Image: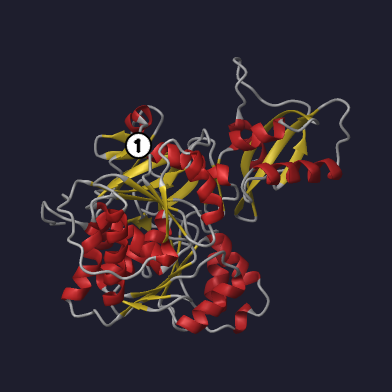
Amino acid sequence: MELPDRYNVGADLIERNLAAGRAAKIAIHSVSADLTYGDLHKLTCGAARALLDIGVRREERVLIAGYDSPGWVAAFLGAIRIGAVPVPVNPLLQRSEDYDHYLDDSLARVVVVDNNTEEKLRPAADRAATKPRVLRADLLTPGDEVAAAPTRRDDMAFWLYSSGSTGKPKAVVHLQHDIPYTCLTYAEQVLGITERDTTFSTTGLFHAYGFGNNLTFPYWVGASTVLHAGRHTPATVLDTIEKRRPTLFFSAPTLYNAILNSEGAKSRDLSSIRHCVAAAEALPAEVWRRWKDVFGLTILDGVGSTEMLHIYCSNRLNEVKPGSSGKPVPGYELKILDDEGKPVATGDAGDLYVKGDSALALYWAQHEKTKRSILGEWFFTGDRYRADSDGFYWYEGRSDDMIKVSGLWVSPIEIESVLLEHPAVTESAVVGISVDGFTKIKAFVIAKQDAVRGDALVGELQEHCKSRLQRFQYPHIIEFVPELPKTVTGKIQRYKLREKEAAPA
């Protein structure tokens, strides 16, 4: 990949389309408006000017907490355009306090919100030590040309947050050249994306997967994209596909399965789609087969990460094994090592490492975590994999105790801490288990002696977690046990509980 030393990806993603004569082509389809590339350029310049007018300077952070919209895109690209650093975060967090960490960690000067998130973010901004200004994405207006900052290809461009085993999300720092690398590798060489495509992703722009699917990939080649604000259901997804006629559809395995199980799905028209893509969690082979049987479409399952920015291992149309994560994407190398750092034999499981030039520069203010994760040119993924004799990679679980449910990371420690707050609980351990090919959260609970164990207490504990955590952070299954497996120093051995659940009855 050849880029000039002075390179601004926020400017390039739009201006390359203006230079190619696509100013009048639709860049974004949305409920609020359809924007051409020319419209998007003006709106981005308007966002850039708004940030400059309130004093945002180069490399200062701009937190973005809003639903997918043209204003979200303009705020993101506008921030990079002036050399600032956009920091997207999940707009679906339930409480204002959930945003305190992001504001304190990023030292954001500005928070970009919309009418869905302003009520949560304004109190958080007031509490923050930096007292950031609040800007509404949906109230941004088009503006005149704003010169792009002369950033370098290796300058900091944007952050994305990734959850950690302690429950505190950590900022993944990406550079200006990282986006083009994912476009030239996965987008062009696996998807074969062109300007004739229209993309539609059910994963939001704040997430690395959705960010590539519905922003960087289409703009790189001059394609169009469909933005849907808010939560997705099988009905909204199918309605959007029939109305907007996307050619590339991206979703998570849980939603693919929900669509298959929804009433009337078989009669819906998905004929516009040429590729379906799955990531963010492992795709069960049975879901792959059912989707193929019902719609005649192949799902290209793959694995990526926030740290690598997008998918680095994937199935292809002419090379696919249902249930696997496929083969390395061109431009990336993978290796599987044992506990002593030696390559494992074919078919044996070990820790997965990946090398590619879209890798994070560092975890912000996480020096020890950075040293443990970035080993020269290689990134330690935290996933356990095995490779078969044909070169396909198969997911075997996490190297740590983190749980991925419906594409979102869950810390068992957080759930255990909340369970311990309940007066009926003495101790608990939380793990992820497989149920019909999907990961579910299971809690093993030691109840207090006078507690009445049963369905009523299970329901009470689940509601207790739902009221204090995010909507997806509660145990789907609870089992009352007399004791938990522990090391001699008293640390809970969650892997023994996982092994117990995986063992045949």
Percent x, y of residue 378: 29, 39
Please, what is the three-letter code of the amino acid marked with disc 1? Trp
* Residue lying at 13% horizontally and 56% vertically, measured from the top left: 3
Answer left or right for 270 relative to 333: right
Q: Residue 422 is drawn in which quadrant?
A: top right
Quadrant where the C terminus is found in the figure: top right
Percent x, y of residue 290: 58, 70
* Residue lying at 53% horizontally and 36% vertically, measured from the top left: 167
Q: Is residue 201 above or below residue 414?
A: below
Percent x, y of residue 236: 58, 74
Q: Residue 139 is drawn in which quadrant?
A: bottom left
Q: Which residue is mark 1?
A: 364
- Decide which of 8, 417 is in the foreground and name it: 8
Q: Is residue 72 above or below residue 128?
A: below
Quadrant where the N terminus is found in the figure: bottom left
* Residue lying at 34% horizontally and 33% vertically, measured from the top left: 370
